[in-house]
Image (cartoon, rainbow, N blue to C red):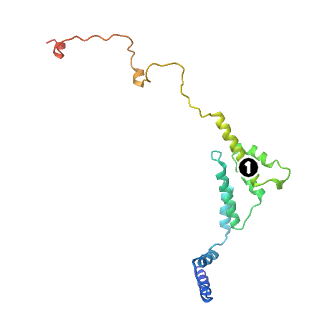
Amino acid sequence: MEEAIARQVQDAAETAAGAGNQITAQHWWDQASTLYNITTPATIYWIFVQIWEWRMSPNKPPQGQLDHLLMLYNQLEVEGQTLPTLTRVMTLLAALPKDWQQLVTHQVLNQPAVANITWAMATAAIGNHWDGLQAHKKHLHPQTKVNKLSAVQRKGPNQTLQQQTAPYQGSLSKVPQKKGKGKACARGT
């Protein structure tokens, strides 16, 4: 196999040189591309499996995810295989999160004719659903900050746990210490 490829490249180089053509990097690229860009069933299968296993995450904005799926479809087209639009849309609808499927699928499939179902319509319905979910989340969880947890006014700064669990000192007066000559007086000397 390698010998056959080397022979083809050598023949192409001799043909180009013999005809007085200048051999350029582009010429070599074109020759290598012709030899190595071979569509194989394994390549098509690998791309198809990626499409089949693709699932939309409900936690991420849909546009980037849809772009990735569209890129996979474009890779399949580069390999010479094109899926019909309806198949692409049905695959997309089947890959939606479970709690999105009923609403989005109904919106997309509620058309008078199959020919009216398009990729653009499906992606617009998904985008509208995402926008609605984001607006609903903002409504449920407003971004306001709570300043007070209690209406009870407190005196002084917040206490630490040790201060809160210490015994109550109350208004007990402290025992006055005797005045004297320091430690010697306290020892009784």
Task: From the viewer's perspective, tell me whether residue 68 is left or right of residue 177.
Answer: right
Residue type for callout 1: Ala
Name the residue: 70% across, 42% down: 99
Secondary structure, mark 1, is: helix
Q: How many marks?
A: 1
Pick the quarter of the image with the N terminus. Answer: bottom right
Pick the quarter of the image with the C terminus. Answer: top left
Name the residue: 31% across, 12% down: 174
Residue 46 seen in the figure: yes
Name the residue: 64% across, 52% down: 64
Name the residue: 57% across, 77% down: 25
Image: 150 above or below 33: above
Image: 95 above or below 21: above
Q: Position of residue 118 (x, y in %)?
A: 78, 54
Q: Position of residue 182 (x, y in %)?
A: 18, 16
Q: Quadrant of residue 33?
A: bottom right
Task: From the viewer's perspective, tell me whether residue 88 is left or right of residue 183.
Answer: right
Q: Nearer the viewer, residue 3 or 26?
A: 26
Q: Quadrant of residue 29?
A: bottom right
Q: Which residue is mark 1?
A: 124
Image: 131 above or below 170: below
Q: Residues within 10 Å of mark 1 (few under 14, many from 20)?
A: some
Q: Quadrant of residue 150?
A: top right
Specify the farthest residue to the left: 189
Q: Position of residue 57 (x, y in %)?
A: 64, 48
Task: From the viewer's perspective, tell me whether residue 38 is left or right of residue 85.
Answer: left
Residue 93 seen in the figure: no
Q: Nearer the viewer, residue 42 or 117?
A: 117
Q: Nearer the viewer, residue 123 or 163?
A: 123
